[in-house]
Image (cartoon, grey):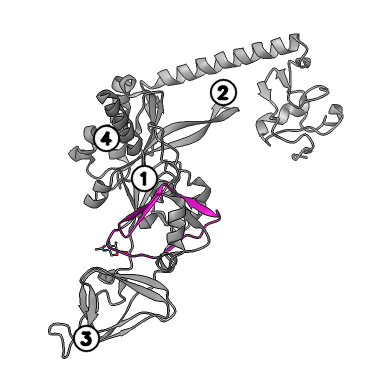
Amino acid sequence: MLKTQHMLLLLCLVGAANALYKQWIPDTNYENKTNWDKGAVPCGNDIAQFSAQRKVSVFVETLHAVKEMRLPVDGEFILNSGAGFFVLPGQEPGCGQGVATKFKDSDSLQWFDPALWQGAATLDDLQRGNVLFSVHEERVPCQYDDVVFKALSSFKVDTSSSQSSIPVKSVSVLGKKFDSGSEFSQYLSSHTGRLQFHGSSAVTVGNPGCGDPSGCECGNSVNHERICGSVKCAALNCKMPLSPVGHCCEVCGAIVTVHYAGGFNMQTYRQRIHNLFLILPQYKSIQLGISKVSRSQRLLVIFPFGASPEIQVTILDGGDGTQAEALAWDIVKDVRTHGSHLGITEAEFQASSGNSSDQSAGSVGMVVGVVLGVLITIVLILIAVALVRRGVIQMPSVRLSLSSFKRNSDIGELGGPLDHGFANPMFDNLNTLPNIPDLHNSISITQTGGVYFVNPVYDENETDFNA
Ligand SMILES: *[C@@H]1O[C@H](CO)[C@@H](O)[C@H](O)[C@H]1NC(C)=O
Ligand SMILES: *[C@@H]1O[C@H](CO)[C@@H](O)[C@H](O)[C@H]1NC(C)=O
């Protein structure tokens, strides 16, 4: 019985470990001097001024002396216990002449601005400033993340997006955690909620967390353009800049691609990389982000067979990428010796110097890939042959030379428009196929192309969009 409980607890811990906490950085606090146009909190001789039209919820933590205060038409102060305002009878010593200080406008701060968020693996890490580096798309809360607005603070965030809702796991506001959808939408329609959240999309909570120990895809690629809209990319000084999936800018550094199998745990692996490498003095300036991404796979270059998830480790060093490359090597070597214990089948890297792990010992994966590719091709050919034998599909005559055919010259021979599926130039020699009564949902064999499928998803009524 005790054992079961332990098991359950362990599962909970592992499950929870995959969610990240994303904290909104700006606030609308009275005490934060960056919120005032003079760069200082108004003192006893100053006039604290809020623009009349701005709707804002301001958190006040302590007691303040002011000479005068000009308030907005619609807004609110959230007073911490013991907080408030009073007017001094005389001058406050050490406060200077006294000026009118304006509270800055925070209406334009966007939910999808990656610079305004920081992420951490635990709430504790967030508080201690142990924040994680990640690609731009994942700085903004992912669908399974816990969103945190600092406890003793208020804020204003514009949630406009092209989507009608922004799903997340939970939202914490003013120290209260909302993880039920109805409770949070009630909060959003309250006076404070409407001052804090504005914009066309509604943040919705109650999304399940990431239940996959190997990690989950963030889901922010639908908002890629909006996320990247405010990002300014730095000038680069490396030979072959890299483009990490989910990042807005090209970077100098290295990308390690990790292929995993059952037993891989994202959180454990993140900790391993931290404990083995990131704490070393030579990697002090390294920024490393781990994410699960999907890249569409191509067999024998031309044959797309869907997207398969893999782990992308993005490594930047703030320089030309030399340190990042050294770390990428360390990570690949670690996988080659300990990968099987970690549920990792393979890892390779590409660096912005042009170097990659394939240059030396890394050819094993390549060989495996080619062998696998050839095997799959053989299986597909066997299936095709079997189907032909059973009369399910018709076998076109195999032509030995395709070079003697001119492109586009023999469409007429086909007796009608031809569905090309994707406008892939590799498939242009379809035009040279002999007369096939029905090309849809069929498999054919030619000398050059090997085997291809015509994608049945494409509407039969759609005509040739190459023409
Ligand atoms: C004050 O606001 C700035 C910018 O919004 C933020 O970076 C900083 O953390 C805030 N200061 C405190 C003490 O929270
Ligand atoms: C690229 O690889 C070569 C050979 O392994 C090495 O000498 C060189 O330092 C590497 N370049 C970088 C930028 O690390």
Mark 2 Cα within 10 Å, few/some/many (few <14, many 20+)?
some
- Residue in front for this viewpoint, 431 or 387: 387
Q: Is mark 4 within 8 Å of ligand 2?
A: no
Between the C-alphas of marks 4 and 2, the distance is 36 Å
What is the three-letter code of the residue carrying label 1? Answer: Ser
Question: According to the image, label 2 marks what residue?
Answer: 300
Instruction: Report crowding for label 4: few under 14, some 14 to 19, many 20 or more residues within 10 A (C-alpha).
Output: few
Q: Which badge, 4 or 3, comes first in the chain's sequence?
A: 3
The mark lying in front, picked from 4 and 2, is 4
Q: Camera-side residue: 240 or 74?
A: 74
Q: Nearer the viewer, residue 339 or 240?
A: 339
**Which residue is the extreme one toward the front?**
1
Q: Residues within 10 Å of mark 3 (few under 14, many from 20)?
A: some
Label 1 CA crowd tier, 10 Å (few <14, some 14–19, many 20+): many
Q: Say which label, 2 or 1, has the lower sequence index.
A: 1
Q: Are the residues tagged 3 and 1 within 8 Å (C-beta)?
A: no
Residue in the picture at 71% in, 31% down: 428
Q: Which mark's residue is nearer the viewer, 2 or 1?
A: 1
Farthest residue in the bottom direction? 90
Query: In the figure, residue 217 lies in which quadrant?
Result: top left
Q: Residue at x 54, y 18 (%)?
A: 373
At x 70% / y 28%, what residue is drawn?
Answer: 454
- Residue type marked 3: Val
Q: In this figure, which residue is indicated by the disc labeled 4? A: 271
Per the model, the C-alpha gap separating discs 3 and 2 is 77 Å
The magenta segment: 150-179
Q: Which residue is mark 1?
A: 134
